[in-house]
Image (cartoon, rainbow, N blue to C red):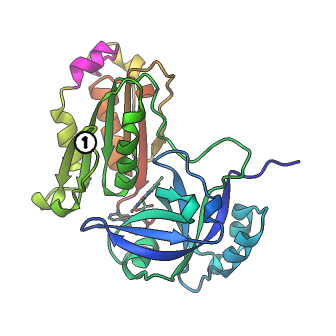
Amino acid sequence: MATKPSYRLFDITLARRTQVSASLVRFTFTGPEVSQMATYAPDQRVKLFFPEGGGSLDPLFEIAKLEEHDWYGAYRALPDAQRPSARTYTIRALRPEQAEVDVEFVLHGDNGPASRWAMRARPGDRLAMTAPDANAEGPKLGFEWKPPQNVRRILIIADETALPAAAGILETLDDLPLKPRAEALFEVPRSDDVQPLPQVAKLNWLAREAEPDCQHGELLMRALRDIDLHTEIQALGGTPANTTTSATTNDESDDEDGPLWESATLDDSAPFYAWIAAETKVAMELRRYLVNECGLPKKYVTSMGYWRKDKANG
Ligand SMILES: Cc1cc2nc3c(=O)[nH]c(=O)nc-3n(C[C@H](O)[C@H](O)[C@H](O)COP(=O)(O)OP(=O)(O)OC[C@H]3O[C@@H](n4cnc5c(N)ncnc54)[C@H](O)[C@@H]3O)c2cc1C
């Protein structure tokens, strides 16, 4: 018998919206099956579907009613014109006992179906969502935050789209047995996007509005360069790119179309862990800096492109 797929479709209804900060809104959804939803890590990803351009969510609501379903096959089978837009988001919090799930959206404008929906959404609005099924038997999938149990040093680097995940990560840091020294760099649009988050890491908030000409990610790169990482990375055996041996140990030469998603490959004894999520090119450049310039072995870095500047994610 086939194993139950790890993700399923959920029919969800907006219960309330809460302004978290100037650019970020938390949406609390409820629904008949939300008590059967699961989340395994603070960066658990989900897909949300938006009824755009004549596409209706009704076919997805019908699929969601079925106990066993292949949501992806059914979604792909819809005619192009009727297929709703899908975008990836993060479960900020799940309360299965109350059948509630929170997702936080960056309001970046009217230029994409997700942000457009978020700007206008009112309680009672319905969406479809794929998320982990608590009753699935297979492996737990859909997240990258996998800190080694004995890690001593953590870097968390996020722009506003990854802040929901990063905020959740901060809430779990105290669970790590060796209480690692953690540092977080958060780039946000405005100074009133700063949120009260657990002070378990050295938090560095970087608001672009303070420097109107700066590009997305520029403040993250500057702040990363300001941390004296070279010495501690050398202590881990890393070799920066300006030495003769680095090309074979750390070479990281991804080009513009190179990898957007790189997962650390670590066992529990690893001392260092970097988790980066931001605009795709920004995430690539931050990773390149750590690997090429600082000599950090690639295996210590998880780096993810969460969106692409001037390109729809669909
Ligand atoms: C694993 C994962 C988890 C994510 N979690 C979250 C989350 O919890 N909250 C969240 O808000 N986003 C999250 N994102 C990012 C989100 O999927 C993208 O921002 C997505 O492009 C938004 O879709 P859209 O329909 O609004 O815009 P699209 O149709 O994809 O893009 C339209 C235009 O808007 C631009 N654009 C897209 N996002 C932004 C932005 N943030 N700022 C400025 N311009 C933008 C694009 O460059 C494009 O020009 C996540 C992405 C991934 C891969």
Position of 171 with respect to 84 (left or right) is left
Residue 152: x percent and y percent? 34, 23
Q: Quadrant of ligand 1?
A: bottom left
Q: Nearer the viewer, residue 269 or 100?
A: 100
Q: Is residue 217 above or below residue 156?
A: below
Q: Is residue 47 magenta?
A: no
Q: Is residue 136 left or right of residue 227?
A: right
Residue that label 1 marks: 199
- Which residue is at the front of the view, 166 or 228? 166
Q: Quadrant of residue 291?
A: top left
Can the viewer see residue 211 in this picture?
no
Q: Is residue 195 left or right of residue 149?
A: left
Q: Hey, which quadrant is residue 271 in on the image?
A: top left
Image position of 68 with respect to 112: above or below = above
Mark 1 residue crowding within 10 angstroms, few (<14) / some (14–19) / many (20+)? few
Residue 146 visible in the displayed image: yes
- Region in magenta: 229-242
Residue plotted at (73% across, 52% down): 5
Given the image, on which type of amino acid does mark 1 rest? Answer: Gln
* Residue at x-position 50% and y-position 45%: 41
Residue 54 coordinates in the image, percent (x, y)? 58, 86
